[in-house]
Amino acid sequence: MISRKLGRSFYHSPRTTARGRRRVKQVAPCAAEVLESRVLLSGTLGTSPAAATTLLVDPASTNPAVFHTIQAAVNAAASGDTIKVAPATYNEDVTVPKSLTILGGQVLMAGESGPSTVEFQSIGFTVTANTVTIQGFTIAPNPNSTSVPPLLAILASNSTESKFDDNVINDSELMLGGGVTHATVANNSGTFYLEAINAISTAPNSNDAFTDNVFEGSVFLSETSTGDVLTGNVVTGGGFENIATNVTFIDNTADDASDGFDQFGLGNDTYIGNTADNDANTGLDLIPGGPVTAIGNTANGDGTGIDVGGPGPYTVVGNTANGNLFLGFLVTSTSGSILLNTANNNRTGFEVVGTSPTLIGNIANGDTDAGFSISVGSATLIGNAANNAGSFGFAISAGTVSASGNIANGAGTFGFAISTQSGTISGNTADNAGSFGFSIAATTTVSVSGNTANSAGTFGFSIATQTGTISGNTANNNGDAGFTIAAQAASVLNNTANNNLDAGFLLALNGGTISGNTANSNQGPASAVGNTGGFVISGSGNSITDNIAQQNAGDGLVLDGLANSTVSGNTASNNGGDGIHLVGATGNTFSGNTADNNAHDGFDVDVNSTGNTFSDNTATGNTVFDLSDASTGTGTAGTANTWTGNTANTTNPPGL
């Protein structure tokens, strides 16, 4: 069945070129035509009839053994013979029903030069036999032809192991019309169309080779073709259109087409080392009905560089897509791997929409919108890099995400913007983002570990999740807070936030664990209570242990609205405000904490903080009071809290 995208087949509408409208030129009979029943034998009179013979064609020859038309030589030849054709213009359509080798451009007499030109009416060479060779001709429609397009320079059908090489073909087509197998089409040039299409036979084409052809036109492989190999062809203005199966494209070039390589067939095709530049729509548009492999291809300056769709699976490895108007890579297949590709200076480097892609070792630099834009069911990203993206280094929306060892530097807004149900984010780096190093929203649980976010415009890490573990991350020198985390029952462990412009940690947790974290030299002033400090912690039912807050411009630990939590073993020293500051904190237990040498109070409990218990804490060397409690009630020293066994030199009120 002829595909809806047949392009140029026997069923096309007629061309309206000037050539197509001209009338046929009448050619006078040649005076030597009577000699054409004779042949020139390459052997002797005693040669076996099966021996190959060489026949000569030269209209200028007066030798009675030399033919004046190619068809006459074909008619006289036996299978296996060779026909040598002298330079001249041959106004004929040649039918080849035998296994012959027909060679153009053969100098047979002194002074001859130039091509053997076949100017045909409808079909230059019609081949219906096996092992036919057509080589070295210039083939074009007769200027006076009135035939209805398509005009075919060569039409082969039901032919095996034929060769069509080293021809110059203009304004016409080379068509393998059905039932052609193991044919070779090589080193042809000109302005022509190349088609492998079942247009006249129910037998499919298979295992044909198209090699090193250079022409302005296009290539079309129909759904009835399979197993073809295209290597080293250069096509401008038309590109490669493929709806065949099991086709291999190697080192071909398609420039200045609508789509350089356009595939939408059954799949199982492989593209290796091809180049598609300056194509209006897509360089490699690979949307098959099955698997596809693209390795080491280049698509630059197209609308979209490389588009991979269909059900997959796909393998996209080592390709380059730079400077495309819209997307470097667009992947919409349901599953597959995207490995070691490069996409620079596109609008978006990689846009992936599918079910479960794996992206490893890809690089996207200088893309004006996003380095990676991923919206999938699940995604795995390992060792990718997105630098200097206009907005997003990585924009990921997925049911589940696994992202490790990726780098996003210099993004205009977000280094990583991740929206997921659950995920594992580990060992990634986001530096110098315009706003957020990491913005992570998980509806169930997330693990964020070993990541680095430095010098973002606002937050190093902004994380919202139900549960999860945030551990071993570093956020330094960010424009607002190092970490802002809102979670239920999450664990915040062993993270570091130093030298951020406001707070080290802004934490709103319920039932969480906050332990082993360090917040030093963060710059938010003590006057901005609840917004700045080493740690600003709110929520209920948390365990806050063994954290260190030192040399922050504001308070060490600000417990803002904290309730029913355990605070123990923390150190808050040498801060510009209070060591540990309670604001509206109720029902908490404080034990074994150290708050020394702070510029204001060691412990500062505001008037709204009640029902807290303080035992075995140490606060010495603080500038104002070591212990200060502004609440009133029936607790220790007339406060609303209980103080026992603490070590301090100065207290307000006395007796704490």
Image (tube, rainbow, N blue to C red):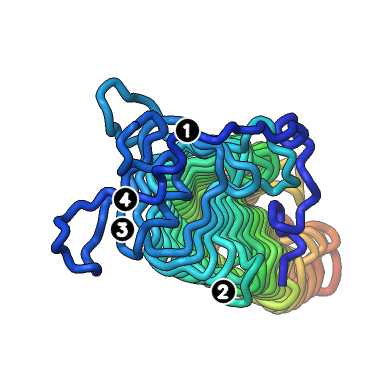
Which amino acid is tagged 3?
Answer: Asp
Q: Is residue 449 visible?
A: no
Q: Are marks 1 and 2 in contact (CB under 8 Å)?
A: no
* Residues tagged 4 and 1 counted as in contact (Cβ below 8 A): no
Q: Which residue is mark 3?
A: 81
Residue 639 falls left or right of residue 392? right
Residue located farthest toward the top when viewing the structure as drawn: 111
| Alpha carbon separation for disc pair 4 and 2 | 37 Å
Q: Which residue is mark 2?
A: 204
Instruction: Name the residue that disc number 1 marks.
Output: 31
C-alpha span from label 2 to label 3? 28 Å
Q: Residue at 71% x, 59% y: name it.
A: 6
Type of amino acid at the residue the image marks with label 1 = Ala
Q: CA distance from mark 1 to mark 3?
A: 26 Å
- Mark 1 vs mark 3, foreground winner is 1
Q: Position of residue 342 (x, y in %)?
A: 49, 47
